[in-house]
Amino acid sequence: MQDLLKNILRQETETAQAAWELLKTLPDYNKARQELEKATETIRAQVDFPTYDAWESAWLACCSCELRTYFALGLGLRREFIRELML
């Protein structure tokens, strides 16, 4: 079981790196990233830092859970196992 978990975590890191390398080559991603950065700066200028920081932290946590769930399902893991990994 411990080896399985190590393999999953290593594969997740390798997959994340491969995804990042691929994303950097996609024009749609680069355009979306630029638009996100522009919108982020607009929001930062309109709210104080603690408010923006709280929103960004919550948003990133939510996105992280979603991505890990897609990845785990893509590995063919059972839902019960995924829930345990995410606790």
Image (spheres, helix red, strand yellow):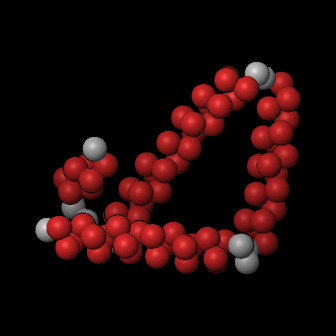
Does residue 50 appear in this view?
A: yes
Looking at the rendering, which quadrant does residue 40 occupy? top right
**Number of disc labels:** 0
Looking at the rendering, which quadrant does residue 17 occupy? bottom right
Query: In the image, residue 36 lies at what x, y percent?
Result: 77, 49
Query: In the image, residue 19 lies at what x, y percent?
Result: 57, 73
Q: Is residue 80 above or below residue 52?
A: below
Q: Pick out the residue farthest to the left.
A: 1
Does residue 74 appear in this view?
A: no
Left or right: residue 52 versus residue 27 is left
Identified at 14% across, 68% down, the residue is: 1
Identified at 78% across, 23% down, the residue is: 47
Identified at 31% across, 49% down, the residue is: 86
Query: In the image, residue 41 lies at what x, y percent?
Result: 83, 39
Identified at 65% across, 31% down, the residue is: 53
Taking depth in this image into account, of 42 and 6 the one nearest to the observer is 6
Left or right: residue 64 versus residue 32 is left
- Placement of the C terminus among the 4 image quadrants: top left
Query: In the image, residue 70 lies at what x, y percent?
Result: 42, 60
Q: Is residue 15 above or below residue 43?
A: below
